[in-house]
Amino acid sequence: MNNIRNFCIIAHIDHGKSTLADRLLEHTGAISERDMAEQVLDDMELERERGITIKSHAIQMNCIVDGQPYILNLIDTPGHVDFSYEVSRSIAACEGALLVVDASQGIQAQTISNLYLAIEHDLEIIPILNKIDLDNAMPEVVEDQIIDLLGVKRADIIRASGKTGDGVEEILRRIVTDVPPPAGDPDAPLQALIFDSVFNPFRGVIAYFKIVNGTVHTGDFVKFVNTRKEYDADEIGVLRLDLEPRNTMSAGDVGYIISGIKTAKEVKVGDTITHRDRPCDKAIAGFEEVKPMVFAGVYPIDAEDYEDLRASMDKLQLNDASLTFEPESSAALGFGFRCGFLGLLHMEIVQERLDREFDMNVITTVPNVSYRVHTTDGQTTQVYNPSGMPNASSIREIEEPYIRAQVITKSEYIGQIMTLCLDKRGQLVKQDYLTAERAELTFDMPLAEIVFDFYDKLKSISRGYASFDYHITGFRPAKLVRLDILLNGEMVDALSSLIHFDNAYTLGRRMCEKLKELIPRQQFDIAIQAAIGAKIIARETIKAVRKDVTAKCYGGDITRKRKLLEKQKRGKKRMKQIGNVEVPQKAFLAVLKLD
């Protein structure tokens, strides 16, 4: 155990974690030249395409320092705020963390957020200044920021480059000397933490674990503490570039277990594995439950695909433990699921993965957040979508979730960023200057306001410089209303939304205008109305397609024309009573994309 080191790499998005991991793998010979590729651990097609890490990846390396052989277990983590749950799970399986900071961009919001996560778990932090080979690198300035943040000496910061491989020797030496070996007793009852799982169509669910105490052998009879299920350990082993089987693994080891589990629900990330005959006293604590931030309905385009969608979501949930879902139905869209996501990028990635990996075409409804509704009879309910909102007369108060948002930006963009945040009902809490050039702004804002396009607007205002991080602080009372869209007096439930009273009129107006463009004309007039309760706040009318019935009158008295027009009017009126309006698919999608 003294020769094992478990560590992860944490950083803000695009600071070079995966490239640095490539150099470490190359240097230790964990990967052959033939298998070498850019960002070798990002094996998902989507990750390579977008150049981001979506899923944490674990891999084992061997290295020799001062004549001693060591086993290093590395976990490469995502940097985007939407995947911070992946980071928290990786941190739970490690004793040390490499904190990577880009020498040209300096410390950004997610760097600080991930650092606090690591410090909460008492991890040994090794600061690394990456990309020092760039022409616009500012090593001295960024080192000062790291010293302010961590309180380390300048000599403790390793200067490295993921591209050229500078500093890799020094990083490996520091991992061995600074990161403590895992603490645990190989002779105690087995206690192993599941920190990830993947689904293999041939072998079932593969669970990744870290052994805290005890020893496990191939063929042992094991038990999962939370689900109370028992299995044979058909195969255990370590995570190299491929899975490598082993006969025995003991305290401190990180590896995988295959036990023929076929259903996704039986493996919970954060569960504890123990022996059936000699169980441990208690499960491993300190593992957070995932808290979804954004909710949206996901429906199959073809209603017959509902069962296939359920199976796809189950398998996807294994690869992505932060996805939560439950069945729901809609009058307009049929049967589907109400899904909880960690953010808008997460929602987009899930949609893409359903399409690519499972060939499922889905419609996603307007994303919203969960509200807390207090009714006049003293009940409190959580409302995730507009159709679940109680009757307006029975509502005493509605509370919405608030976040504490931190924006780190160059000082020249402060004015525009403040305007953006205040427009989104934000309140400035404090403003700190990290250096003369960089400032940190802290706002309290409603989560519902950042769900749509906040991140995109922030990036375009600051030309990509500003970085953004947030955490939920609780619920506050809000003046929210339910905005309904009516077609000829009939409500379309898929187009309803919960919105702040101040923004309701403008959104209602724009939705009506958009639908007028997209709904095809019928033989009768169609009234499109936006309503709050019984009050209509906006209206557009799609005029009927009319035939010129007076064309055959080429003279004579006006009453002849009047008679024909009256006859047409009566026909239109009768048609309107029995006609119904189909909302085309593209109209739903266009309304969701209103910017």
Image: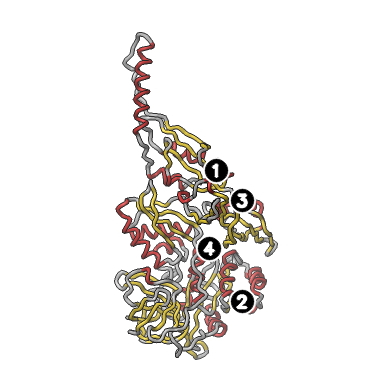
Q: Real-space Cα distance between discs 2 and 4? A: 25 Å
Image-quadrant location for residue 191: bottom left
Q: In the drawing, what numbered circle is on residue 81?
A: 4
Which sits earlier in the primary sequence, circle 2 or circle 4?
4
Disc 3 residue type?
A: Arg
For disc 1, the neighbor class at 10 Å (few under 14, some 14 to 19, many from 20) is many
Residue underneath mark 1: 504
Q: Which residue is mark 2?
A: 157
The reply to whether dot 4 and dot 3 touch (C-beta < 8 Å) is no
Camera-side residue of 86 and 321: 321
Q: In front: 186, or 168?
A: 186
- Secondary structure state at the residue bearing disc 3: loop
Left or right: 64 in relation to 337: right
Q: Amino acid at mark 2?
A: Ile
Please tell me how crowded label 4 is: few (under 14), some (14-19), or many (20+) other residues with Cα within 10 Å.
many
- Amino acid type, callout 1: Ala
Alpha carbon distance from label 3 to label 1: 14 Å
User: How far is disc 4 from disc 3 in space, using C-alphas?
Assistant: 22 Å
- Answer whether residue 86 is visible to the viewer in this image: yes
Residue 329 vs 580, above or below: the answer is below
